[in-house]
Image: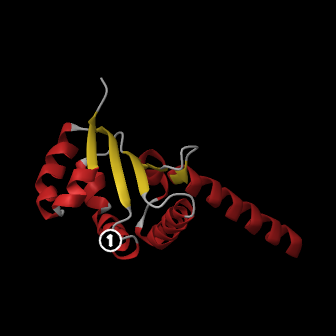
């Protein structure tokens, strides 16, 4: 019976790792992919530390291959309700990146952004320093 529990725990951790790797991973070009489509099924306040820890690991691994980070953020289908629900995570995430990876961003491409996201970005971008803002590229949603 004990081995069954250990096997289940190992299998559960393996499944969680696979799922985290769908949320954030390094592609063949050594660019970081962040995929909201998977985050929305895993992200809740009890799992924020796990998510942040995984993302930090991926960023650090990427920096062993390249001196700066190129990030591709896919936010297809994000809604205002989901942004509000995960605002605490967004704040923690932004502060963590600012503290642990200063001046490491090469470019950040945001894909599939809705009109609403673009409007919200325009508002919050006044709080982003000029050099960082130049590195963020909003790619309009494909119709």
Task: Evaluate whether residue 63 shows in this view.
Answer: yes
| Nearest the eye: 106 or 115 | 106
> Of helix, strand and loop, which one carries label 1?
helix
Q: Is residue 28 left or right of residue 42?
A: right
- Of all residues, the one furthest to the front in this rendering is 67
Task: Find residue 83 and report its image quarter.
Answer: bottom left
Quadrant (top left/top right/bottom left/bottom right) for the C terminus = top left
> In this rendering, is residue 105 above or below 57?
above
The residue positioned 53% from the left and 59% from the top of the image is 62
Q: Which residue is mark 1?
A: 98
Task: Find residue 4 and report its image quarter.
Answer: bottom right
Q: Is residue 62 left or right of residue 82?
A: right
How does the figure colour the protein chain or chains?
secondary structure
The residue positioned 39% from the left and 70% from the top of the image is 101
> In this rendering, is residue 132 above or below 2?
above
> In this rendering, is residue 73 above or below 132?
above
- Of all residues, the one furthest to the top in this rendering is 143
| Nearest the eye: 120 or 6 | 120
Quadrant (top left/top right/bottom left/bottom right) for the N terminus = bottom right
């Amino acid at each position: 019976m004990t081995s069954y529990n250990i096997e289940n725990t190992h299998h559960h951790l393996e499944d969680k790792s696979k799922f985290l790797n769908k949320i954030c991973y390094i592609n063949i070009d050594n660019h970081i992919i962040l995929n909201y489509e998977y985050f929305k099924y895993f992200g809740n306040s009890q799992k924020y530390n796990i998510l942040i820890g995984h993302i930090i690991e991926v960023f650090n691994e990427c920096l062993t291959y390249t001196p700066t980070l190129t990030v591709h953020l896919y936010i297809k289908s994000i809604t205002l309700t989901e942004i509000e629900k995960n605002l605490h995570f967004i704040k923690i995430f932004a502060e963590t990146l600012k503290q642990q990876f200063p001046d490491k961003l090469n470019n950040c491409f945001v894909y599939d952004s809705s009109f609403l996201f673009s409007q919200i970005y325009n508002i919050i971008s006044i709080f982003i320093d000029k050099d960082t803002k130049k590195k963020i590229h909003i790619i309009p949603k494909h119709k």
